[in-house]
Image: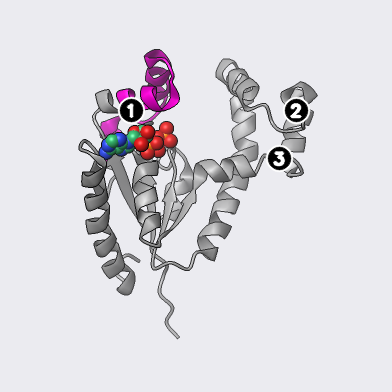
Amino acid sequence: MHTRQPLIIGVTGGIGSGKTAATDAFAALGITVVDADLVSRDVVQPGQPALAAIAEHFGRTILLAEGNLNRKALREIIFREPAAKQWLEALLHPLIRQAIISRLQQSDSAYTLLSSPLLLETDQQTLCSRVLVIDAPESLQLERTVVRDNSSPDTIKAIMASQFSRQQRLDKADDIIVNDGDLLALHNAVQTLHKTYLDMSKTDSHE
Ligand code: ATP
């Protein structure tokens, strides 16, 4: 019997580009969205082996009173110490990848989205049939994120500098949504691509 490869669309974009706004619109059309950010939080929940390993490596001061990971403290350590960042990534990336794979396998929608800010910077892209980039001018990324997070422009600029550039991302894209209009325009772009992906999911052309 011939079984068709599932169609998996990797969705990425810089901070504040509109990944969540776009994937929410796909989800409203019945498409399963696996969010790599959420998965990366799940693997360090209390009771998970990764959290125990982190507490052993960095000391129990890395935990909050209720036993949850102090993400802010950890972020500050890995910002200062490249070796700590390397250690953490070596621990977490394979676990995150495994958890993503299992969620992708559980999906029963016509195609599935894997949304990840670091899709192209990590090996997560290899799990996908195609890459959809949500693209926005940097000035808009900054403006939207400052409003959403109430952060300083300098903080957002530093995060933008640590990510792939707009052009690096576009170079890897199979599909692009330019999110420089209002939310209605974004929803229309999602509708159009949804039809394309439904057609693709019925053929083997994405294999
Ligand atoms: P992050 O990488 O930080 O998670 P993101 O790419 O998921 O960001 P969103 O959270 O979807 O970005 O969008 C950033 C902010 O901009 C949100 O408050 C969102 O509602 C708003 N936004 C996104 N697209 C539009 C749009 N076309 N019109 C108006 N507001 C938008």
Residue occupying the point 42% across, 43% down? 119
Give the residue at mark 1.
144
Residue occupying the point 79% across, 30% down? 56
Give the residue at mark 3.
50
Q: How far apart are marks 1 and 2 (CA)?
A: 37 Å
Q: Is the magenta stretch mostly helix, strand or loop?
A: helix
Where disc 2 sits, the SS reads helix
Whether residue 12 is visible: no
Where disc 1 sits, the SS reads helix
Q: Quarter of the image containing the N terminus? A: bottom left
Is residue 87 found left or right of 167 in the rendered image?
right
Give, as a three-letter code, the residue at label 2: His
- Considering only vertical position in the picture, is 99 above or below 63? below
Give, as a three-letter code, the residue at label 3: Ala
Give, as a three-letter code, the residue at label 1: Arg
The part of the image, by quadrant, that contains residue 149 is top left
- Considering only vertical position in the picture, is 168 above or below 34? above
Is residue 162 found left or right of 205 in the rendered image?
right
Q: Does the residue labelled 1 lie within 8 Å of ligand 1?
A: yes
Q: Position of residue 7 (x, y in %)?
A: 38, 64
Q: Give the range drawn in magenta.
A: 142-170
